[in-house]
Image: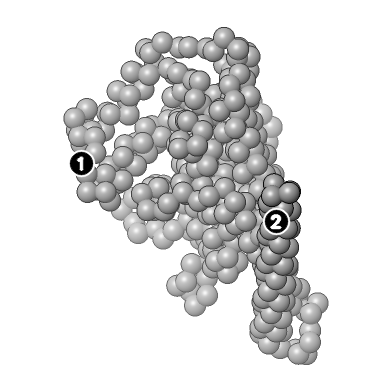
Amino acid sequence: MGDPYLADGVVFADVLLAIGKAVVAFVVLLVSVMLMVWFERKVVSRLQNRIGPNIAGPFGLFQTLADGIKLFFKEDIIPTRADRFVFQLAPYLALVPAFLTFAIVPIAGDFNGDNDGRVSMFGRETFIQVADLPVGILFFLAMSSLAVYGIMLAGWSSGSKYPLLGSVRASAQAISYEAALGLSLASVLLVSGTLSTNRIVDLQAADGFGGFIPNWNVIITGFVPFVIFLIAGTAELNRPPFDLVEAEQEIVGGFHTEYSSIRFALFFLAEFMNVVTLSAIMVTLFFGGPAGPDLGFLPGWLWGFVWFFTKLLFFLFTFVWFRATLPRLRYDQLMDLGWKVLIPLSLGWLLILAAIRLARNGQIDVVEGNEFANILLVIAVGIGIMLIAAILLSMAIRTARETRLKERGLVAVAVDGAEEG
């Protein structure tokens, strides 16, 4: 477990290798963010029948760089009533977790046959990722929880009510969807049996059903955890249609209203960096990461990068498609979706997957000696229980809503009677 170059102790060359991998990953991520901003502008413009950036550089590729330079030289204003230290620190608290999360993502490597993604660098075997932590998925959950602190502290430290409203919405939104995100991840961990991202990719590189269907976790877990992860992850990123943190028509510009210059840009850098990072995590957990067929004429590890980038590009386009297509939810709809739909569904599906695992191990043997029949029985019973629970939950919510409306009606009648008296 962990990077192979650390298995026989740490020497000075290993330290240089680790630093080099971190620097390269940081540069790759920054360039990816710059291209992501350009990609989103161009795709949205095409979907809305516009042109998009096309002046700065070929095809407008340098437009993001030009915007960054412009923001860097703008005047940096700190409000008089702001907490200066926290106000200046908040943008970095939003930015750093995104990079630290990307550090556990394997972006290339040869996973065909008995290979586990190792490559040789400077005479040492290593993985093409900054670090393969034994608790990599737990590290991802920790970083996703810490990211909201940057937004919350930015709103609180501004000394203004409108940014504070935006930051409060952000914390409530993150708490609401963190549980669903964690439960969908638990489904992947249940079928993989490991917390290492490299090992999760290696397990998905095996042959699937029939020898031609991929052994991806999105198929093994039954698609539902992936859909929940995609929705919850979009809400965690404050991306449309869940961008209630920056509801301009209600709270001006959101938590970053009082920011200017480069600190203002850092929040958007963090947002787009989180989009790239979350897309990479989804590719790793559900779609095999760099694992894919070796078609020859390229080194095996380079084919891993090709497959990883192709899958990553698909999800980046999906997030842009969401922005251009879906209208913003109301805040009550956002909370209802998180607490009343995603959390119960993710928990119920996790229990079904656990029961299927027990049936495969022979611990649930209702139809003696017939594993397939036992699995079908578990699935049927589990889905039936979930449907009954959904009906009961819907009835309880409807009853509570009707009771609340009746109470409001009685109060209104009493107020009208008092005014007439």
Residue 188: which quarter of the image? bottom right
Image position of 385 with respect to 88: above or below: below
Residue 9: which quarter of the image? top right
Identified at 50% across, 58% down, the residue is: 287
What is the crowding at mark 2: few (fewer than 14 residues within 10 Å), some, or many (at least 20)?
Answer: few
Query: Which disc, if any, is residue 413?
Result: 2
Could you say whether the residue bearing mark 2 is in a helix, strand or loop? helix
Say which of 280 and 68 sits in front.
Answer: 68
Task: Kindly identify which residue carries mark 1.
Answer: 51
Residue 265 in picture, x, y percent from top left = 44, 24
Residue 179 is left or right of residue 70, and the answer is: right
What is the crowding at mark 1: few (fewer than 14 residues within 10 Å), some, or many (at least 20)?
Answer: few
Identified at 45% across, 35% down, the residue is: 248
Number of numbered discs overlaid on the protein picture: 2
Identified at 24% across, 35% down, the residue is: 53
Query: Which disc, if any, is residue 217?
Result: none
Residue 280 visible somewhere in the drawing: no
Residue 388: which quarter of the image? bottom right
For marks 2 and 1, the one nearer the N-term is 1
Residue 185 in picture, x, y percent from top left = 64, 54
Residue 44 is left or right of residue 414, and the answer is: left
**Amino acid type of disc 1?**
Ile
